[in-house]
Image: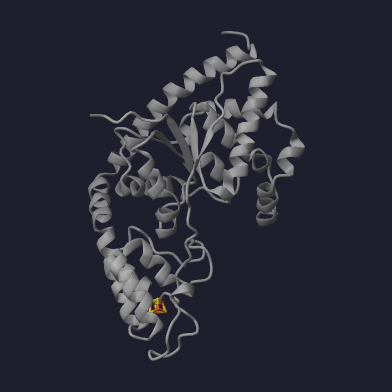
Amino acid sequence: MTKLKKGRVFSGARPTGRQHLGNYLGAIQNYIALQDEYHCVYCIVDIHALTTMDTTEDLRQNTYEMALDWLAAGMRPEETIIFIQSQVPEVTELHTYLSMVTPLGKLTDLPTFKEKARLHPHNINYGLVGYPVLMTAGIALYKSDAVPVGLDQAPHLEFARETVRSFNFHYNTNVLIEPQMVATEFPKVLGIDGQQKMSKSLNNHIELAATPEETTRRVMKMVTDPQRIRRSDPGNPDVCNVFSLHKFFSSPEEVAMVNVECRRAGIGCVEDKQLFARNLNKFLEPFRARRAEFGRDPNLVWDVLRDGQKRASAIACQTMQEVREAIGLPKP
Ligand code: SF4
């Protein structure tokens, strides 16, 4: 029997190409799980990406690789709408209308804008200021009931909710839906340096699509408890990133064993990393098989995105008709 779903969830991610363990644990696994409870709309937000992008030469390939990884990880395109933001241009129209009810000062005061301006001082463009308005337009265009966000991102969603309320109030309508928060855990995953968040630009990542050999090679380079110099030194798993990741990919018995043996130097870091690499590679086996299946013909992924675009467009066109009507724009 088909399970009754709770409503529509929307989320977007920038096209960052091949995904890594940080992307998987931080977002993709939630995307996959939400499919069981919600009608999901997942968007590759290429327009958002343009706000901070110096060059677009890899944009198309990165979009393809990310969609391929999403599918390999378990997105079900027959249920879930997966599409590219720029291919449903209604979002830019709604962005414009929402910008009319958004005070400029509110945007420039947002900590996220200040942070982006600090990181990209050479390119503080108009799009960067309006980023949260475009984000709100994406959520509202698809009449999303809910958005998965970590607690630290709750203010972003609050901005979207306020903007929707302002629009509805301003035009005396209820055409746009105030999205609710699906409180979700987004664990911060450190890179193989054990210091900074896992990120491609820092080259401290482990790609989901890497070969088993490459995965093992990266795991063996992982920084462990810095106080553990010799094999005979007891270690502290609480400060070790290998141990943090064990918790996601190893059995509870293995995690418990490492927790005890590391502290009394009963297991060495090399041996433990080999164990972790084996478990990680085993976990990734079905992912790699699905990736090979979807990747055998690039048209498969583009067809999924084209189909997603059609389904997303149908919702967007309907919403925009209602929005134009609510605003009182002249009919064609
Ligand atoms: S034995 Fe494992 S948990 Fe302990 S420090 Fe080494 S890698 Fe980390």
Q: Position of residue 186 (x, y in %)?
A: 48, 52
Position of the C terminus, as image quadrant, is top right
Q: Nearer the viewer, residue 239 or 252?
A: 252
Query: Where 17 sits versus 103, above or below?
Result: below
Query: On the rendered structure, is 16 left or right of 265?
Result: right
Q: Residue furthest top?
A: 331
Q: Position of residue 93 (x, y in %)?
A: 58, 25
Query: Where 27 sits versus 132, above or below?
Result: below
At horizontal 53% and vertical 71% (from top left) the residue drawn is 195
Q: Position of residue 240 (x, y in %)?
A: 45, 74
Position of the N terminus, as image quadrant, is top left
The reply to whether residue 247 is visible in this rendering is yes
Q: Quadrant of ligand 1?
A: bottom left
What colouring method underlies this structural image?
one colour
Query: On the rendered structure, is 216 left or right of 102?
Result: left
Q: Position of residue 7 (x, y in %)?
A: 42, 29
Query: Where 101 sits versus 12, above or below?
Result: above
The reply to whether residue 216 is visible in this rendering is no
Q: Nearer the viewer, residue 255 or 87?
A: 255
User: Where is residue 300, by image quadrant?
Assistant: top left
User: Where is residue 241, by image quadrant?
Assistant: bottom left
- Count of number-bearing discs: 0
At horizontal 49% and vertical 71% (from top left) the residue drawn is 194
Q: Residue furthest right?
A: 105
At horizontal 38% and vertical 89% (from top left) the residue drawn is 231
